[in-house]
Image (cartoon, rainbow, N blue to C red):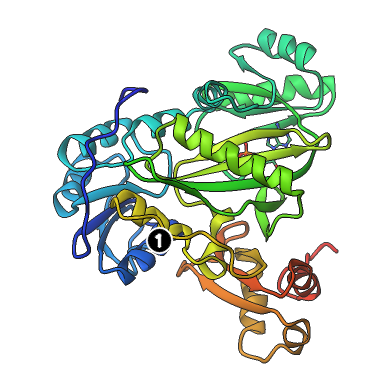
C-alpha cells in the first residue's frame, strides 16, 4: 500500500447497487440502515456471526485479514467501504485491485499510524500537540525532558478508547510506562499533555468532485477514555466554531478525503485548537446527526462514496448524545417500558438506538440515546438525574 496512492476515477453508484462494508459493527449497521432506506443493498465481512451489521445485511463470516473472504466481498459488492481504520494492508490492496474503493487506501495508510497522521496534519497546516517518536528508553527520557510532564505515551498503531496509552505525570512514571509500552512491540509516540478546556470534533464529508460539507461541531465528554456525551451545539464562541469547521474543511481538502473524516480536537484554555486524531469513517461523536440534523453522517457517507450530491447538514434541534455501555444496559431496560415524567417536564425526547450486541460487557458500546431538547442544558439535566448512568461507586 502506498501512502500517496491516488484515489480511483469516480463512479456514480446508483440505488440497487450493493455496498460492501469491511467490518460488521454498529457503524456498519447504521450505514446499512441509512443506505438501505435509499435503496442500496449491503454485504459485510466480519468474524462474529450475527454481527450488528450482519443483522441488517448479508454477512461473510471471516477474519478481516482473510484474503479469500475479501475477494468474495469484492465479487458481491459494487463499491467497498470500511467502518474501522485497521484494515489489513494486503486486504486493502486486494480490494482496490478487484473492486471499487472510492476512499482509496492512502488515507487509511495515513490514519492507521499516529506519526504518519501527525505529519499529514502538520502538512495540512493544522496544529498538533508537540510530540516525539520514541524508539528507546533513552529517547523517552530525552523527550520527557524536552516536552515536559504531564505527557501521554501512545502506541502509534492499534489504539482505541484509550487502549495503548500511558499518562506520565511524574518522572517516576517513565520507567514503568516504558516497560509496559515497549512490551506491546508497537512503535511509540510521546505527546505533550494538552490541558484542554473542551474536546471538540467536526465531521466533514467530501465527494470525489470536491464538494465538501461539515457537520456542526460536537463538544465531547469522555469518561475513562470512552466517549460519554456529545453536546450540540457545542458551548463555544462563534469564532471557535468557525475555526473548528474551517480546520476540518482544510484537512479534508488537503488529504483528498472521499467519504467522511472525523477530526478530534482539543480546545486549549487560551483558545488554541489542536488536532488530536482523525478517523476516516463515521464517528461516535457524529451519532447525534441521526436525529438532530437534516442529513445523518451515515447518509452523508453513502452519498459521498456513491458520488451523489451531499445533504444539508443543518442542525434541527439542540441534542445531547449519550452512550449506553454494557454496564448501563440493565438500568436502561428497567427505564424503557415506563413513561418518564421528568423527560416530559424538561421537554426532552430521548431517542433510543441499540446495536443488537448479544453480550453486555463492561465498557462495550451497546447503543446510544440522542436526547433532543429545547436547549442542551435540559438534555444534560435529564441525563444527570437519570438512573441509567448512575455510577456504582458514587
Ligand atoms: N495529548 C493529550 N492531551 C490531553 N488529553 C489527551 C491527549 N491524548 C489523549 N488524551 C485524552 O485521551 C482520549 C483518547 O485519546 P485518543 O488519542 O483520542 O485515542 P483513542 O484512539 O483511544 O480515541 C482523548 O479523547 C483525550 O481525552
Ligand atoms: Mg480518540
Q: How many marks?
A: 1
* Quadrant of the frame with the N terminus: top left
Residue 360 falls in image quadrant = bottom right
Q: Position of residue 237 (x, y in %)?
A: 77, 48
Residue 162 visible at all: no
Q: Position of residue 48 (x, y in %)?
A: 36, 57
Q: Position of residue 53 (x, y in %)?
A: 36, 62
Q: Say above or below: 258 vs 120.
A: below
Q: Is residue 292 left or right of residue 37?
A: right
| Relative depth, front residue between 309 and 146 | 309
Q: Position of residue 134 (x, y in %)?
A: 61, 15
Q: Say above or below: 92 vs 371.
A: above
Residue at 50%, 67% in the rendered image: 294
* Quadrant of the frame with the C terminus: bottom right
Residue at 68%, 59% in the rendered image: 233
Residue 312 visible at all: yes
| Relative depth, front residue between 17 and 243 | 243
Element class at badge 1? helix
Q: Say above or below: 384 vs 196.
A: below
Q: Is residue 259 left or right of residue 268?
A: left
Q: Residues within 10 Å of mark 1 (few under 14, many from 20)?
A: many
Residue at 69%, 52% in the rendered image: 219
Q: Say above or below: 212 vs 371.
A: above
Name the residue tied to disc 1: 299
Q: Is residue 285 left or right of residue 268?
A: left
Residue at 40%, 61% in the rendered image: 299
Amino acid at each position: 500500500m502506498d501512502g500517496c496512492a491516488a484515489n480511483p476515477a469516480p463512479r456514480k453508484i446508483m440505488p440497487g447497487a450493493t455496498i460492501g462494508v469491511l467490518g460488521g459493527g454498529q457503524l456498519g449497521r447504521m450505514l446499512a440502515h441509512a443506505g438501505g432506506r435509499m435503496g442500496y443493498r449491503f454485504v459485510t465481512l466480519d468474524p462474529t456471526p450475527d454481527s450488528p451489521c450482519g443483522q441488517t445485511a448479508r454477512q461473510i463470516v471471516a477474519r478481516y485479514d482473510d484474503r479469500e473472504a475479501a475477494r468474495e466481498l469484492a465479487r458481491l459488492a459494487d463499491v467497498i467501504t470500511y467502518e474501522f481504520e485497521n484494515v489489513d494492508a494486503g486486504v486493502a490492496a486486494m480490494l482496490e485491485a478487484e473492486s471499487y474503493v472510492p476512499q482509496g487506501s492512502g488515507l487509511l495508510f495515513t490514519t492507521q499510524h499516529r506519526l504518519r497522521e501527525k505529519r499529514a496534519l502538520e502538512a495540512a497546516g493544522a496544529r498538533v500537540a508537540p510530540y516525539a517518536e520514541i524508539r528507546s528508553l533513552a529517547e523517552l527520557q530525552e523527550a520527557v525532558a524536552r516536552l515536559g510532564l504531564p505527557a501521554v505515551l501512545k502506541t502509534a498503531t492499534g489504539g482505541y478508547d484509550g487502549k495503548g496509552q500511558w499518562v506520565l505525570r511524574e518522572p517516576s512514571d517513565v520507567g514503568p510506562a516504558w516497560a509496559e509500552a515497549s512490551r506491546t512491540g508497537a512503535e511509540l509516540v510521546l505527546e505533550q499533555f494538552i490541558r484542554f478546556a473542551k474536546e471538540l470534533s467536526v465531521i466533514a464529508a467530501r465527494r470525489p468532485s470536491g464538494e465538501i460539507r461539515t457537520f456542526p461541531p460536537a463538544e465531547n465528554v469522555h469518561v475513562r477514555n470512552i466517549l460519554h456525551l456529545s453536546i450540540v451545539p457545542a458551548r463555544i464562541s462563534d469564532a471557535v466554531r468557525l475555526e473548528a469547521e474551517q480546520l476540518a474543511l482544510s484537512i479534508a481538502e488537503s488529504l483528498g478525503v472521499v467519504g467522511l473524516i472525523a477530526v478530534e480536537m482539543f480546545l486549549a484554555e487560551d483558545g488554541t485548537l489542536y488536532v488530536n486524531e482523525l478517523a476516516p469513517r463515521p464517528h461516535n461523536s457524529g451519532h447525534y446527526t441521526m436525529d438532530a440534523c437534516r442529513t445523518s453522517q451515515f447518509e452523508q457517507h453513502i452519498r459521498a462514496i456513491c458520488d451523489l450530491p451531499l445533504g444539508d447538514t443543518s442542525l434541527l434541534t439542540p441534542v445531547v448524545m449519550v452512550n449506553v455501555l454494557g454496564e448501563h444496559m440493565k438500568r436502561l431496560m428497567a427505564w424503557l417500558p415506563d413513561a418518564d415524567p421528568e423527560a416530559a417536564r424538561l421537554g426532552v425526547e430521548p431517542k433510543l438506538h441499540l446495536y443488537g450486541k448479544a453480550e453486555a460487557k463492561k465498557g462495550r458500546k451497546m447503543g446510544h440515546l440522542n436526547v433532543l431538547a429545547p436547549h442542551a442544558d435540559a438534555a444534560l439535566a435529564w441525563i444527570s438525574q437519570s438512573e441509567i448512568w448512575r455510577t456504582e461507586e458514587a
